Image (cartoon, rainbow, N blue to C red):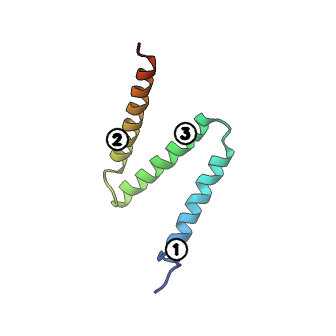
């Protein structure tokens, strides 16, 4: 069997390592939480676009939107509960 101990072919591992390096450099360069959120959001959008473009997951952008909407709703509920009474 070719590949690494993870069972992934070397070209897949190399692609993942390159992506990780690309995004990790950007994460390390941020200085605020807002910048960190923007980098992470850009990473998620890029992953969703790749998934849609390759046909691996045509609903990827929609799924990302649902995750973000769920997170936002949870934050809004928590904030509303803190301000009640």
Q: Which image quarter is the C terminus in?
A: top left
Within-10-Å neighbours for mark 3: few <14, some 14–19, many 20+: some
Which is more toward the observer, 79 or 85? 85
Query: Between disc 3 and disc 1, whose residue precedes?
Result: 1
- Please state if 65 lies on the left or on the right of 35 as rendered: left
Q: Are marks 2 and 3 in contact (CB under 8 Å)?
A: no
Between the C-alphas of marks 2 and 1, the distance is 32 Å
Please say if 70 is above or below 49.
Answer: above
- Please state if 33 lies on the left or on the right of 41 as rendered: right
Estimate the x, y position of residue 58 in percent, counting from the top left: 31, 54
Q: Disc 2 or disc 3, which is closer to the eye?
A: 2
Per the rendering, the mark at residue 38 is: 3
Q: Residue at x 37, y 61 (%)?
A: 54
- Please state if 11 lies on the left or on the right of 21 as rendered: left
Query: Between disc 2 and disc 3, whose residue precedes?
Result: 3
Between the C-alphas of marks 2 and 3, the distance is 18 Å
- Helix, strand or loop for disc 3: helix
Per the rendering, the mark at residue 66 is: 2
Estimate the x, y position of residue 22 in percent, counting from the top left: 60, 56
- Helix, strand or loop for disc 2: helix
Quadrant of the rendered structure where residue 52 is? bottom left
Q: Residue at x 53, y 45 (%)?
A: 40
- Helix, strand or loop for disc 1: helix
Q: Are marks 3 and 1 in contact (CB under 8 Å)?
A: no
Estimate the x, y position of residue 53 in percent, counting from the top left: 38, 56
Per the rendering, the mark at residue 11 is: 1
Quadrant of the rendered structure where residue 65 is? top left
Please say if 79 is above or below 44.
Answer: above
Q: Residue at x 58, y 34 (%)?
A: 34
Query: Between disc 2 and disc 1, whose residue precedes?
Result: 1
């Amino acid at each position: 069997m070719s590949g690494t101990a993870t069972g992934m072919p070397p070209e897949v591992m190399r692609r993942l390592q390159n992506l990780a390096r690309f995004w990790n450099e950007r994460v390390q360069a941020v200085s605020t939480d807002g910048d960190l959120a923007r980098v992470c959001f850009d990473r998620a959008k890029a992953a969703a676009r790749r998934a849609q473009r390759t046909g691996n997951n045509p609903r990827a952008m929609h799924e990302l939107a649902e995750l973000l909407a769920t997170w936002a709703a949870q934050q809004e509920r928590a904030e509303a509960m803190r301000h009640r009474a």
